[in-house]
Image (spheres, rainbow, N blue to C red):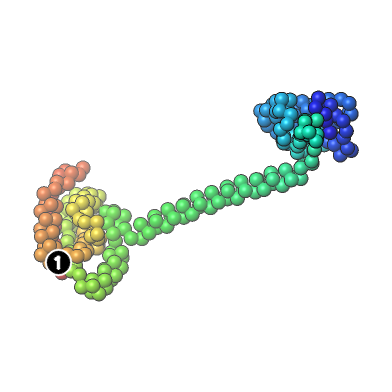
Amino acid sequence: VIDERHIVLDCNATALRFFPLEKGKPFPIERLLEGALEPDFGRSFLQSYLYNKGKFLQTEVIVREPVPLNVAVKITPIYNDNGGYVGRVVTMQDVTEWRRLVHELHDKNEDLTQRNSELTMMQEELSNANRKLELLATTDPLTGCYNRRYLNQMLEYQFAVEQRYGGPFSLMLFDVDHFKQINDTYGHHIGDEVLKHTASVIRARLRESDILARYGGEEFAIYLPHTGKREAAFLAEQLRILVESHVIRTEAGDIQITISVGLVS
């Protein structure tokens, strides 16, 4: 208990265990705040202690002797019956175990956050790996078109849908004319360039819903949903002219090709 001039009037044994106090001497607030957890807040607390006597104050400090302790400090003003300020009551409470538990909980939360972050990263990596595997399983590595396996699976599903709802569809087959001659004349690596170029030209002309697949060798198939025979025939002629008009520039020289197209509607 301290008076209005900050002089210690009385203290119990527990308070002495936390901090050396002497009756009749000023309460050593500056020394106590040397252990403030936040120095800036400690300075602000000291200003309030000195100049705002009627204000309730609360902070936490570390008392380092004889062993480090976390101590919660509360300063409550005292008034007489007439409402006049007469002093303060300073209470100090050992919160070392509570603070330890707070730090322990904080560390566990940080560890849990880190583990969740690692788990999220692993899930993203797994998802990316699955997408890559799906891509490898459904596409032709040379041309980037769908492969025959994927085409067969999609045709089975699409045929069932079209038959159920009665919508038109068409299937287009085409191959590169005289492709064996290209391989024999220029080599297989040039033949590969011809296939990649042809697939790229065709793909650029198709709709997003159309399915272009490499059926095998120089043979390709295109599934055209919601496409009748007349529309499919018109598209086939467009594709034939488009491929024929393109010049494929290779290290062996410029090459022009033609394709042969068949339709099922």
- Quarter-of-image position of residue 237: bottom left
Mark 1 is surrounded, within 10 Å at the Cα level, by few (under 14), some (14 to 19) or many (20 or more) other residues, namely some
Taking the spot 80% from the left edge, 38% from the top edge, the residue there is 91
Q: Position of residue 125 (x, y in %)?
A: 46, 52
Taking the spot 80% from the left edge, 30% from the top edge, the residue there is 86
Q: How many numbered circles are shown?
A: 1
Using the image as rendered, state which of residue 186 and residue 65 is in the foreground: 65
Using the image as rendered, state which of residue 187 and residue 49 is in the foreground: 49
Against 43, residue 62 (above or below) is: below
Q: Position of residue 157 (x, y in %)?
A: 29, 70
Q: In screen coordinates, is 255 left or right of 12?
A: left
Against 124, residue 137 (above or below) is: below
- Quarter-of-image position of residue 53: top right
Q: Position of residue 46 (x, y in %)?
A: 72, 27
Q: Quadrant of the C terminus?
A: bottom left
Q: In screen coordinates, is 191 left or right of 10?
A: left
For the view shown, which residue lies furthest in the bottom direction? Answer: 164
Using the image as rendered, state which of residue 237 and residue 210 is in the foreground: 210
Which residue was labeled with disc 1?
Answer: 228
Q: Amino acid at mark 1?
A: Gly
Q: Position of residue 212 (x, y in %)?
A: 24, 59
For the view shown, which residue lies furthest in the front direction? Answer: 82
Q: Can residue 58 be seen here? A: yes
Using the image as rendered, state which of residue 56 and residue 159 is in the foreground: 56
Q: Can residue 32 be seen here? A: no
Does dot 1 land on a helix, a strand or a loop?
loop
Taking the spot 69% from the left edge, 45% from the top edge, the residue there is 102
- Quarter-of-image position of residue 258: bottom left
Q: Quadrant of the N terminus?
A: top right
